[in-house]
Amino acid sequence: MDSVPGRIVISVDAMGGDRGAAAVAAGIIRSAAKNPDIAFIVHGPEPELSRLLGRRRELQGRCEIRHAEGVVKMSDKPSQVMRHGEGTSMWSTVESVKRGEATVAVSCGNTGALMALSMIRLRKLPGVNRPAIACLWPSRNPQGFNVMLDVGADIKADAEDLLQYALMGASYARNGLGLARPRVGLLNVGTEEHKGRAELKVAHDLIAAATEAGAFDYVGFVEGGDLPSDRVDVIVTDGFTGNIALKTGEGTAKLISDFLKEAFNATFLSKIAALLALTSLKRLQKRIDPRRVNGGVFLGLNGTVVKSHGSADALGVSAAIKLAFRLAQSGFQDRLAARVASAGQARQDAAVQGTGPAVGSPGGTS
Amino acid sequence: MDSVPGRIVISVDAMGGDRGAAAVAAGIIRSAAKNPDIAFIVHGPEPELSRLLGRRRELQGRCEIRHAEGVVKMSDKPSQVMRHGEGTSMWSTVESVKRGEATVAVSCGNTGALMALSMIRLRKLPGVNRPAIACLWPSRNPQGFNVMLDVGADIKADAEDLLQYALMGASYARNGLGLARPRVGLLNVGTEEHKGRAELKVAHDLIAAATEAGAFDYVGFVEGGDLPSDRVDVIVTDGFTGNIALKTGEGTAKLISDFLKEAFNATFLSKIAALLALTSLKRLQKRIDPRRVNGGVFLGLNGTVVKSHGSADALGVSAAIKLAFRLAQSGFQDRLAARVASAGQARQDAAVQGTGPAVGSPGGTS
């Protein structure tokens, strides 16, 4: 692979997705054609990958194939993959980030296994107890998306974890969505301060006290209906609730989309109407197309990992690669680490001095 | 009020909704015009209610106004309403069910306060630890809706509570939706048996052992994406998760509906298309219109209470009254109580004899 200044290397797992290596290869080719500043290390069985990627002109000099025989299946248990995963394409993909050959890893494979491998190979960032998966959510905001985390890295989160999610989510929104001072909300069953579980009330106070260290605004509790709203940019919750909310939202969107298709197929007149409205309907579809917001980001590790949807096609894979590139280019990993460290420092100082949260601690853009 | 055989009396709180007494009165009149077998006891300030309802021909001889001066506001804390709520229309509405004057209570007011008042006035059913709120969810099933509970009565639920939700939800689906043997699923972050929180694994086993006593089928764990699916009829979860899922689903539907309107308003051509597609779009709207599935039902008390959406208009209020009528007519309250008692008995027998869950315990239609 040629070394070119300004070029960013992404490590891609070709295997483990529902559509196999062909869809991942098509996504890589699509990204390469659009963006001359990305190079790839692609992991999987060499003969198959050579056939799919070897002779593509777009990839000349910027795609290295790294042979890996094994494949992590969707049904594999994370604990087994942790013990016996060496030699799989997923392991190899994460390893490239650990060794510093690539800046960000991308995989369409088994989420639990990818998180487990990422945890043991990349290790947690100093000061982070539970890493999180952040996803993007179509919203009414000008940037088009809100960030929600955790959507499934861990089924539990205590108040301190939720504070770290706020810091990490704000940093992600700043670097991934270009928001200078993101607005953070804490997901609850009501917006009144007396509502919800005990750990949420503690987290509420912790997050409110960390707005300076984390360079975000805190809007307080938000509800399920606020996930797509324009009064918040980052929604913080535990991984159990976040995962249920994410899948409920996707399921509802799918239901309405199916009902809409049925409605337009109901009569002759409605079929003509659908033809006339095609452009508008496509615009709608584009706004809520899950493939365009493809990529859960693992936060809180020594290295960034993007988890693409298992069923991603070329467009979906290319969206995940684009997200990985944008995060790498912004120096996100170092900024996030600095932010978590400085917030931890601010809390320690406050605890030692007994003066409450530090005000005026390092701001900047991390 | 005339006493007519076969007539069912519904107790309606005229106050506390976002649209005031006028919307509730319009809903009552709508229901009365459609169904000659309902009578009403309506609670609120007598002068206002007399003006709204007094001279309506549809209501002659089947509407009694019960004067109550006080109104529970949306911002009132449940604990305050419990202590000082006597004299409010909400208190009076529940009281009519307690005294046996009416079979089911309907209110558009403050959910937390309504649950608190219902708990202290009606008391919990023997064998029920935590009452639950069940809602209907648009689905791909022939009946058009799935049942989900708890959606916010309590933020916690242990394994025993989840078992009771399964029994109560199945009974509701049988009597409210006419399903002889409902399929019950337990909401989790994955369908594999090793996934999720500890109390969910225990609940999984308890529910699987109660299918005979509860006369339902158990499909195991389901995910957020299954809420509208046709592989399950009743979804069991704790009130925190259920409330987040419910509001996330509503918020997503609202977002798509707004985007759809924008898409059809985008160009001249798309406006013509919208006109042509009007009938189809209305059919779609009808299928997912939250007003038509209006009414959370409080389960596990000595009496049935239907909580209508706070923003319900005449159509919404009338849907809630229709649901209350259907439940009253089916003898739901007694059937539910019998089902919970017999399941408790079966578990006790099994525990005493050490023979596992009783098979062949009373079936029937409760």
Image (tube, coloured by chain):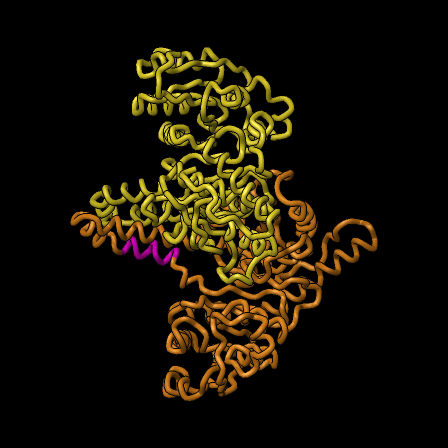
Chain colours: A yellow, B orange
Residue B156 pos. (x, y %): 62, 56
Q: Quadrant of residue A10?
A: top left
Q: Within the magenta stretch, is there residue A46?
A: no
Whether residue B173 is visible: no
Magenta residues, as a range? B279-288
Q: Please tell me which residue is depicted at 47% across the width and 86% down the height of the picture.
A: B65
Q: Main secondary structure of the magenta part?
A: helix
Residue B198 pos. (x, y %): 67, 45
Q: Quadrant of the C terminus of chain A?
A: top left
Whether residue B12 is visible: yes
> Residue pushed farthest front?
A353
Q: Within the magenta stretch, is there residue B286?
A: yes
**In the depicted view, which residue is nearer to us: B346 or B95?**
B95
Q: Please tell me which residue is depicted at 54% across the width and 58% down the height of the picture.
A: B151
Q: Is residue B344 toward the left or the right of residue B82 in the image? A: right
Q: Please tell me which residue is depicted at 41% across the width and 84% down the height of the picture.
A: B49
**In the depicted view, which residue is nearer to us: A229 or A172?**
A172
> Residue pushed farthest right?
B353
Residue B282 pos. (x, y %): 30, 57
Q: Is residue A110 toward the left or the right of residue B271 in the image? A: right
Q: Please tell me which residue is depicted at 36% across the width and 22% down the height of the picture.
A: A38
Placement of A80 over or under A4, stated as above or below: below
Placement of B120 over or under A68, stated as above or below: below
Residue B1 pos. (x, y %): 49, 87
Placement of B127 over or under A3, stated as above or below: below
Q: Quadrant of the N terminus of chain A?
A: top left
